[in-house]
Image (spheres, rainbow, N blue to C red):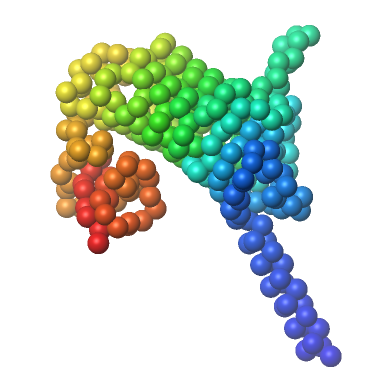
Amino acid sequence: MRFFTFKKTMLFIALSMFCAVSFAQKTVTLTKAGELSEKIAKAEKFEITSLTVSGPINGSDVLFLREMAGRDIDGVETEGKLATLDLSNANIVAGGSNYYKVKRGLSTKFYNNAEDDVVGFYMFFNCGKLTSLKLPKTAKKIEMYALNNCKSLKECTLPESLSEVGGHAFANTQLSEVNFPSSLTHLSDKSFYKCSSLKTLRFTSPEVPLFDNEPFAECKSIEKVYVPKALLEDYKDQLELSDDVVFVGEESGTTGIYSLSSSADAVEIARYNANGQRITGPVKGLNIIRLSDGKVVKRIER
């Protein structure tokens, strides 16, 4: 009898662990905007720690994601545990409900998805559970305060189509490195203000972007900035960084990622495909590998 009781106990534990793992990671494909809440069960909502979403998302979906990542429309903390969010194959569409509101005195302003392909004002503001975020590949602009005060955010993949980052958009995050796409034309007022862990920047734009009012103000840990070699002095003049920051000019490669030789003892810290998108391991074709010494090499994987 005791043997069967033991077996039942172990079976219960195994099932509990399976359910916990199942809830922890989830992939959702949406066919229409506003249906995310229908794809994730109530019991899962605050247990999922890693989520991949594909398809159209509107303001209603953003509110649901905010709640999963720890904050509701009022900015009040929820029980959400979402830490890793992959929206690379999602596309932001206008419409849906409001996802955030700001009270100033007697007035209240509401925010929702006002434009297609724009990471909206306050979209993930103060979502302190997020540690890793991949933004939609189609996003062309990140509005003010979009990821402000996401104090656990250590990694954010910017879309290749991105042209503008709004004021204070990434302020008070824990990003250690930012790789800007070649499409970037504008960094607004203090867009990365007080990112105390930020050490490395990489710019690939063929022309120096417009830098408004110290986008990297109070980022006191920046050590290196990689820029196109032909524009090295222009970037130095316009970025207004500490004299201790080292600027490195890189020769432009055919893929838009810059190519340098590497030292023998350097180790791989990041890998990209031929389109400049970050990948987690080798893929067939051209791989661009960034090394711990700051250099980049190209390799053909077969």
| Percent position of residue 72, x then y | 72, 33
| Percent position of residue 45, x then y | 71, 48
Q: Nearer the viewer, residue 119 or 191?
A: 119
- Tell me what residue is drawn at x 66 percent, y 31 percent: 59
Residue at the far right: name it: 1
User: Can residue 223 be seen from the camera position used here?
Assistant: no
From what the image shows, is residue 284 above or below residue 92? below
Q: Nearer the viewer, residue 16 or 301?
A: 301
- Where, by quadrant of the figure, is residue 249 drawn? top left
- Tell me what residue is drawn at x 37 percent, y 15 percent: 211
- Tell me what residue is drawn at x 36 percent, y 30 percent: 180
| Percent position of residue 157, x then y | 44, 38
Tally of numbered discs: 0
Q: Nearer the viewer, residue 136 or 247?
A: 136
User: Can residue 197 be seen from the camera position used here?
Assistant: yes
Q: Judge left or right: residue 224 versus residue 25.
A: left
| Percent position of residue 143, x then y | 53, 22
Q: Judge left or right: residue 121 versus residue 77.
A: left
From what the image shows, is residue 240 above or below residue 203? above
Residue at the far front: name it: 31
Quadrant that contains the C terminus: bottom left
Quadrant that contains the N terminus: bottom right
From what the image shows, is residue 185 above or below residue 285? above
- Where, by quadrant of the figure, is residue 284 drawn? bottom left
- Tell me what residue is drawn at x 69 percent, y 50 percent: 39
